[in-house]
Image (cartoon, rainbow, N blue to C red):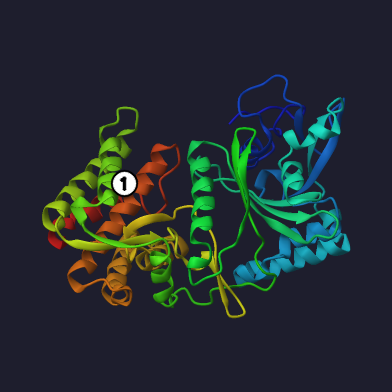
Amino acid sequence: MRSMSDDGQVPAAEASEALRALMGQLWLPPEPSGEWPVRVAFDHVPPDYRAVERYGVTPDPARARFLVPVAGSTSAAASVSRYNGLRPPKLRLSRALLGAGYRTGLAQLLLRRRLVVSLHADLPNRRIPEFVPTAHLGGILGGALVAGISVREPDPNLKPILQLFHRADGKPAGFAKVGWNDATRTLVTREATSMNLVGDAVPVRVPRVLHHGPWQGRMITVVEPLPQGVRRHPDPDQPLDPSIPLGIAESTGTFTKELADSTYWHELTDQAAAMASSGALGEDVRATAKAITAAMDRIEADHGVTPLRFGRWHGDWAPWNVGRHGSDLWVWDWEHSAPAVPIGFDLINWRFQVAVAMRGLELGQGVADAFRAAREELPGVGVPPEARELVAWLYLCEMFVRICRLRAGGGGWHARIFPESMLGVLAGLRASA
């Protein structure tokens, strides 16, 4: 990530790496350019420039976690407290207090550091949407917008997410995901496509896609805001009724095919084999991909003629991607959705992700929970007894290939799913497959 001084295009060295990365993803030119009219600075406007946006940096530039729009107290308060029902209780309280602080003006006094986005004074107003994403989206959605923006550790597979609000009254306008490289552009495009396809065909509420299109080398998807009172799923140990992911599976059609004859299997094995043989990738990726390929060979030898039912999956079916509003179940984050995977993947994903991603348990526990879900929950979506353990192994291969693919794209290994742990799981396949 390029780094320049405060009179340059990204904040000075006092900013965290995560904050500098975020600013580059939102405001730097897609290619290096000496003529780019945007400057991002702390607490001042460079000479010959004019400020177009200001953000409070919470808690400070070196430890930035959230950018709060300070165009008005109402929109600032909304950006930190609007969706409090989806947050864990401890964070819910702190966000509620911070929202109250912005409404009263106290927070503006306490959080003094400002990140200022400026444009060259000679740039005509009509061209502002070319360089400021909120202005670009305001022209599409109608009305001036501000954004609350989370700051996350830099990773080539993560994308900025903007909570959009109308500047005048703080009412929510939507959520925008900004794909800034090949990997993230693919993800935001897949999300828009999937959400448009499933639409009213699934037994859940799916946010409408308000916009999907290119901007300055990025790809942006905007979905409608969630309802004001939406609440988080209360108990991750109690997954939703299996009829719901089954409805998702059937939403764009299902079919039955022998594993080895399925397009799904051919594509997954091809991805693993390509990484295993790529001289451009690190030895850690190649070695892990080789182990995955060997495991897949064993699976195909033992189960290639096993018939499986294929359908769509959400792709990240987990407690943090669902919420209740009255009698409606809302489901978001469809960027990993795919139309033809073995039915049952979503049920296994819930158990696996709760163990590994939510609770930080070792991979072995996530694997054990995946097989428990296969035994106890796959009957609810019609998977026959002889295929349940196979579906669990296929899910693990799917996840391991995804993790290797993300690593190959420049990301880090998951804290609980790194090469050694995956190799240990794959070594046990001979006894179980």
Direction from residue 292 to residue 97 in the image, left or right: right
**Residue behind mark 1:** 419
Direction from residue 219 to residue 57 in the image, left or right: right
Query: In the picture, residue 343 is in which quadrant?
Result: bottom left
Between residues 49 and 188, which one lies in front from this camera angle? Answer: 188
Direction from residue 142 to residue 221 in the image, left or right: left
Direction from residue 201 to residue 75 in the image, left or right: right
**x and y percent of residue 185 in the render?**
53, 41
Between residues 414 and 76, which one lies in front from this camera angle? Answer: 76
Q: Residue furthest top?
A: 34
- Quarter of the rendering occupied by the N terminus: top right
Q: Is residue 67 visible?
A: no
Residue at 82 percent of width and 53 percent of height: 167
Q: Residue furthest bottom?
A: 327
Q: How many marks?
A: 1
Q: Secondary structure at mark 1?
A: helix
Disc 1 marks a residue whose amino acid type is: Pro
Query: In the picture, residue 35 is in which quadrant?
Result: top right
Between residues 412 and 432, which one lies in front from this camera angle? Answer: 432
Classed neighbour count for the residue bearing mark 1: other residues with Cα under 10 Å, few (<14), some (14–19), many (≥20): some
Query: In the picture, residue 108 is in which quadrant?
Result: bottom right
327 w.r.t. 168: above or below: below
Residue at 58 percent of width and 80 percent of height: 327
**x and y percent of residue 194 in the render?**
49, 55
Between residues 234 and 92, which one lies in front from this camera angle? Answer: 234
**x and y percent of residue 281 in the render?**
34, 32
**x and y percent of residue 430 in the render?**
13, 56
Residue at 23 percent of width and 41 percent of height: 290
